Image: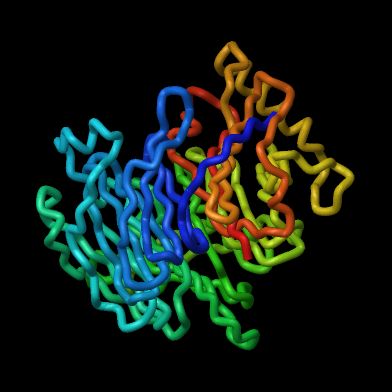
Amino acid sequence: MFVARSIAADHKDLIHDVSFDFHGRRMATCSSDQSVKVWDKTENGDWHCTASWKTHSGSVWRVTWAHPEFGQVLASCSFDRTAAVWEEIVGESNDKLHGQSHWVKRTTLVDSRTSVTDAKFAPKHMGLMLATCSADGVVRVYEAPDVMNLSQWSLQHEISGKLSCSCISWNPSSSRTHAPMIAVGSDDSSPNIMGKVQIYEYNENTRKYVKAETFAMVVDPVHDLSFAPNLGRPYHILAVATKDVRIFTLKPLRKEQTSSGGVTKFDIHTVAQFDHHNSQVWRVSWNITGTVLASSGDDGSVRLWKANYMENWKCTGVLKGDGNPVSSNQPGLMGSSFGSANQSLQNSQNSMNGSSSSRGLSVQTALRGILYIYTKDIAAHQSSVTTKQVYGSAYNCISVPPWTQRLDQGGPVLHALFLRLW
């Protein structure tokens, strides 16, 4: 089911993050070697490194793409207490001739006094905005007033919290009934502190982000969180990676039930909680329709979660580091086997597309400077892998490019995951 190909990443240290662009044809990686690399996918499916440069003076924790509407733009954040915005320069014929691209730093954001732990671009309908969070508990929102001049960024909002910040997620909803919203997670290790996930909502009256909710039920360090794409739902779904995988629904209360300050209050429910990784969970990521969640953890596996028609979430697939599925009798797999999950993928693709074209899950891992790309071939009922030396490693990053599942194409499709060697 999985065909693997290896890529010599040439990073000299641990790779912390991988991010696909909107179309899934480009990806960026960042590492403790203080560099960022950009990869382009060729017509034959190979990945070619087209740019590599030193971005920071410390470990680079995250790298993220802006929407292509704003050009080829990247943001990175680092232990050196800064975040940086990079733009690709086009028209360099000599570079293109040698299959290389050229990136320039447009700005450095230096407001943080501690390590900048995450950076995320806002949904495109909000314009070119970037949110960062820091170990000192401060979330900052920047805006580029002129998308043609990315050297100018203004600090629009500064949200101070009492706990350290480890991750952030924008609510992608573009509905006018939903105010801009940011979820913030904390990796504070104190077991006596509750509420390590907080929701901030933009208030039109005060023109500031104010705290709307605190998840008192989350008491363990949070490594990642992600809002699911909304697509018309009247409520929000938030996935949280902590010592387990948790999925929450946030249903806005009626106006008469909200606070007097105009801040939306939510009815929050835990709809799923899974400890199948039997270890810390490092990353969670949704597909484009918000129907399939991928999680990765210290057990060296990636797990796929999907809700049935009764809204009961179950594990539909488990993938280990060598690209092979885990058998259904192995601990940690709920109900169905991976083979049946693949069959359901094929059936859904056939029913929607009228064919069994290759489509599905591309798993991206890194081991001693080598990237491994695993692609699920739904049409071929076999798998080939180039290495089996990845057991005992831990997945800590997942990236799902938005194009991997369109509404008119059907099927729970995910694209990329990432492995970190401890």
Find residue 211 and report its horizontal and vertical position in percent: 40, 74
Who is closer to the viewer here, 150 or 351? 150
From the viewer's perspective, tell me whether residue 28 is left or right of residue 87: right
Query: Which corner quadrant of the image does residue 219 belong to?
Result: bottom right
Where is the N terminus found, in terms of image quarters? Answer: top right
Q: Nearer the viewer, residue 249 or 306?
A: 306
Q: Residue furthest top?
A: 354
Q: Is residue 185 above or below residue 24?
A: below
Query: Is residue 239 in view?
Result: no
Task: Locate residue 376, reporting x and y percent.
Answer: 63, 31
Tell me how the rendering is colored.
Answer: rainbow
- Asked whether the viewer can see residue 50, the reply is yes
Q: Position of residue 390 (x, y in %)?
A: 69, 52
As drawn, 315 above or below 224: above
Q: Residue at x 31, y 61 (%)?
A: 54
Q: Residue at x 18, y 63 (%)?
A: 107
Expressed as whole percent of the image width and height from the top left, the position of residue 177 reads: 35, 51
Q: How many numbered circles does the render carry?
A: 0
Q: Residue at x 16, y 67 (%)?
A: 154
Which of the image's four quarters has the C terminus?
bottom right
Res 193 quadrant in image? bottom right
Reply above or below: 25 against 76: above
